[in-house]
């Protein structure tokens, strides 16, 4: 189990995260928050790239800083800006990272071929990566993160910049890899979270705001989300969420703190509604 | 720590057993075995090429130094092979988009940099010997000049490793290199013959002791780079 106790990270006088208490035991956890909320700070602390100003991160009760290489052995990490060697093939690149991960050569060769197969890059395994699409590079990224068969897989904005088809493919891949391990996924793409996350963690004002499953989060707005094509008819205070076109009319989706059923129809809340409502004042 | 975490911790220690901390020498041997030359110097080809060209230019300039200033030139040139090779490798590593990713591997990018620095220091010592031999007119002069040049090399290397260890800015090592070269030019230019005389008259025992202390600190720095974790965070 990975647990965070009273984690605070300051950059000078700026507090990026304050007093975060979390536990990760298994499955996919999504860190969902707007940019600048502290997701990447948390991810980097979990990956031992930066260290908490206060508090401790424990893996099975041991401080990850003291565990040092033993902790890094069980972590797979895909950074937000995944760099790569343009003039090398995925196979060469994975063999190199296998060496850095101290995987013996025979196992590395076997594991590399296996992962290239899993991420669907067998046809291009010996081609230089400079001609790869964003989705293909992300698949190389996930393959390198899986090389050491990590107990903790940390993915920072893995689907950002991918086209819809690549996103779906990538989500399916993450989902299939999430068995028997902790997957921590940082994102601000709500649909990714709805599809694969078992638990959603949200930050607000640089503090932990929510840590719950999808249904429980959506239930916080149950009975408060409405849609109408005549928003002017709504006389009670409301918070507009989204608008979409339906047969030439503009349908407005909104949250009403009081009953609006006389002027609008009640709809089931989704995670996007929750996200927009929580961060309605622009707070991160 | 709650009861559940305490039990998990005890189970973990029992499963793993008590492990004796690895010494720097053992760590270096293990890394060298696991990585091999190919992966220790992976993608440093361009850096080595640029470094070789720069060192060749330095050697060309050195060859035309007036005889009266051979010691000043030798002491100035001796650390340059190490400085330049490390500079190109370090800057290209830090500018690489893989820096963070490699820092999360078992052998972190900083540990690999330490291993490379150790290899480059061997190249640096060899280059220093060549420079001292080319500047000296006999074995006796070589014996007095070589320790002075070695002292310069290890002072440069120790300061360089300190910059690598403690300053996280991408261009820190490049800035340090520029400062070192400026200082090494300032002394002979400002002091002229007095600097040359000071180098000629430096007691061999003193310069040898300085070189030995420098080498000791350098090895200690390498050892620290191989073992410390927290100071190697990528961003502050």
Image (cartoon, coloured by chain):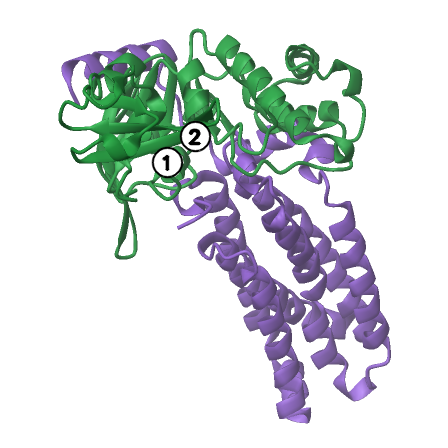
- Nearest to N terminus: mark 1 or mark 2: 1
Instruction: Name the residue tied to disc 1.
Output: A39
Between residue A281 and residue A111, name the one nearer to us: A281
Residue A147 appears anywhere in the view: no
- Chain of the residue displaying label 2: A
Chain B visual colour: purple
> Around disc 1, counting alpha carbons within 10 Å, would you say few (fewer than 14), some (14 to 19), or many (20 or more)?
many
Q: Residue at x 31, y 23 (%)?
A: A227
Query: Residue A74: x and y, percent?
Result: 45, 20
Q: Which residue is drawn at 59% across and 78% down?
A: B183
Q: Disc 2 designates what residue?
A: A187
| Camera-nearest residue between B80 and A230 | A230
Element carrying mark 1: helix
Q: What element carries label 2?
A: strand
Q: Is residue A50 above or below residue A160?
A: below
**Residues at badges 1 and 2 in contact (C-beta under 8 Å)?**
yes
What residue is rendered at 82% in x and 82% in y? B65
Q: Is residue B236 above or below residue A234?
A: below
Q: Residue at x 61, y 67 (%)?
A: B177
Q: The green chain is which one?
A: A
Seen in the image, is B62 located left or right of residue B26? right
């Amino acid at each position: 189990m990975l647990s965070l106790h009273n984690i605070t990270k300051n950059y000078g006088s700026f507090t990026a995260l304050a007093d975060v208490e979390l536990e990760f035991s298994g499955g996919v956890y999504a860190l969902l928050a707007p940019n600048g909320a502290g997701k990447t700070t948390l991810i980097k602390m979990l990956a031992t790239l930066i260290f908490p100003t206060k508090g401790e991160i424990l893996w099975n009760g041991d401080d990850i800083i003291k565990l040092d290489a033993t902790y890094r052995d069980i972590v797979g990490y895909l950074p937000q800006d995944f760099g790569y060697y343009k003039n090398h093939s995925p196979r060469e690149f994975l063999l190199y990272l296998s060496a850095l991960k101290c995987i013996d050569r025979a196992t590395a060769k076997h594991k590399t071929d296996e992962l290239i197969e899993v991420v669907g890059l067998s046809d291009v395994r010996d081609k230089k990566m400079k001609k790869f699409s964003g989705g293909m590079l992300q698949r190389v990224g996930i393959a390198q993160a899986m090389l050491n068969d990590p107990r903790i897989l940390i993915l920072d904005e893995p689907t950002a910049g991918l086209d819809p088809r690549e996103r779906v493919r990538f989500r399916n891949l993450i989902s299939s890899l999430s068995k028997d391990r902790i997957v921590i996924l940082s994102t601000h793409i709500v649909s990714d979270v709805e599809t694969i996350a078992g638990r959603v963690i949200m930050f607000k004002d640089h503090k932990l705001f929510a840590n719950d499953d999808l249904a429980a989060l959506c239930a916080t707005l149950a009975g408060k989300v409405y849609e109408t094509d005549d928003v002017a008819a709504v006389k009670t205070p409301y918070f507009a969420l989204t608008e979409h076109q339906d047969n030439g009319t503009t349908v407005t989706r909104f949250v009403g703190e009081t009953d609006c059923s006389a002027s609008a129809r009640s709809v089931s809340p989704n995670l996007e509604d929750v996200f927009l409502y929580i961060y309605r004042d622009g707070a991160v | 720590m709650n009861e559940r975490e305490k039990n998990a911790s005890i189970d973990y220690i029992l499963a793993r057993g008590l492990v004796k901390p690895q010494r720097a020498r053992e760590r270096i041997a293990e890394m060298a075995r696991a990585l091999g030359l190919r992966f220790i110097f992976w993608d440093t080809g361009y850096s080595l090429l640029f470094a070789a060209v720069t060192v060749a230019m330095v050697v060309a300039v050195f060859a035309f130094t007036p005889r009266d200033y051979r010691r000043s030139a030798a002491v100035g040139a001796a650390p340059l092979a190490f400085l330049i090779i490390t500079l190109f490798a370090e800057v290209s590593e830090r500018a690489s988009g893989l820096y963070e990713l490699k820092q999360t591997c078992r052998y972190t990018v900083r540990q690999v940099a330490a291993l490379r620095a150790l290899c480059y220091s061997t190249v640096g010592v060899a280059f220093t010997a060549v420079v001292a031999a080319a500047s000296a007119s006999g074995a006796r002069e070589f014996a007095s000049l070589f320790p002075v040049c070695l002292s310069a090399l290890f002072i440069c290397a120790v300061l360089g490793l300190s910059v690598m260890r403690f300053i996280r800015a991408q261009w820190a090592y490049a800035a340090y290199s520029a400062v070192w070269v400026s200082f090494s030019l300032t002394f002979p230019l400002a002091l002229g013959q007095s600097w040359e005389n000071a180098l000629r008259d430096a007691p061999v025992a003193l310069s040898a002791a300085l070189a030995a202390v420098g080498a000791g600190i350098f090895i200690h720095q390498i050892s620290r780079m191989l073992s410390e974790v927290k100071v190697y965070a990528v961003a502050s």
